[in-house]
Amino acid sequence: MSKADQIFVDMCTQIIEHGTTTKGQKVRPHWEDGTAAYTIKRFGVCNRYDLRSEFPALTLRRTGLKSCMDEILWIYQRKSNNIKDLAPHIWDSWADADGSIGRAYGYQVGRVSTYADGNYDQMDRVLKDLKEEPFSRRILTNLYAFDDLHLMNLYPCAYSCTYNVTDDQREDGRLTLNMVLNQRSQDVLAANNWNVCQYALLLMMVAQSTGMVAGELVHMIADAHVYDRHVELVRELISRPQYEAPKVSLNPDVTDFYAFTTDDLIVEDYKYGPQIKNIPIAI
């Protein structure tokens, strides 16, 4: 059975059975009808996924992997903050009339900083350092720019990636690239596996671009929560049958991070349960 399913079921059970509630507290999110959106939450959730073992897609329901990849390319490759450059419509509620979500996500990745050896944006610097100094402990991206928060239509949820390389003495000589993903807040039903698959794909693309093997994705969530109107949906979801994880790979001919497209994603043997339709989203 999929290890991602097992991790998800365990996490959701812990949240629902042992979490704390925000009911009655002052909360920012609300439902479309104006009602306050309360949650049951757990603080400091850490989940580990080893991409050398399997790709961490849920089989309890389908995760749209091409859409996941398109959004991660939108942020880290195209470095865009405009929903007109994105195929999925997940950001529509936070965009202005021109399609911008403000100085968020891709805008921050594309900001150029000055280093002793030149000027680089965040993603270009990551790729350079992984190729030239792979054992550096300073290779990361950070989207949480405090000076620009007031100009973001939504503060970044998944906000930083720390890349770390290990030498696992592989026969082919390749190093292993790992990532820690830090997330301040997560709507578990709507976004958990979406984020996991997104950053697993990002890790795979960066690893392939730098001649490495994708290893562990460690996902740290400060506030992992289930909304009050999602509890019964989650209970039903985690009771479903589980299947083997799908086989997910990238076109091996692509070795330039900026050349990847969603056409380079290969998904095989993905068996999954029915989708949950019309999930209410708190905004």
Image (tube, rainbow, N blue to C red):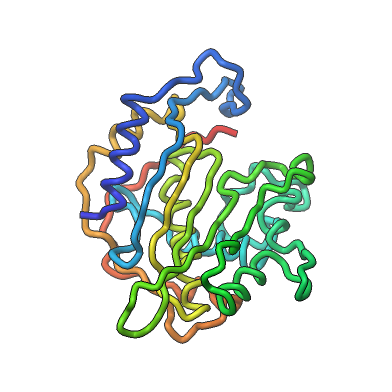
Q: Residue at x 38, y 47 (%)?
A: 47
Residue 53 position within the rendered picture, expressed as x and y whole percent measured from the top left: 28, 65
**Observer-nearest of 281 and 167:** 167
Please state the total of marks drawn on the protein image.
Answer: 0
Relative to 50, 152 lies left or right: right
Rendered-image quadrant of the N terminus: bottom left
In screen coordinates, is 140 left or right of 175? right
Give percent across and percent down for residue 184: 55, 40
Of residues 24 and 132, the one nearer the viewer is: 132
Q: Residue furthest top?
A: 24
| Residue 229: quadrant of the picture | top left
- Place of residue 172 in the rendered image (x, y in percent of width and height, measured from the top left): 34, 85
In this image, 241 relative to 97: left or right?
A: left
Q: Is residue 145 above or below residue 211?
A: above
Q: Which residue lies at the image location 50% right of the left edge and 16% below the top edge?
A: 23
Q: Which residue lies at the image location 70% right of the left edge and 50% below the top edge?
A: 104
Report the quarter where the C terminus lies: top right
Q: Residue at x 67, y 47 (%)?
A: 144
Location of residue 62 in the rendering, given as x and y in whole percent from the top left corner: 35, 53
* 133 in relation to 189, above or below: below
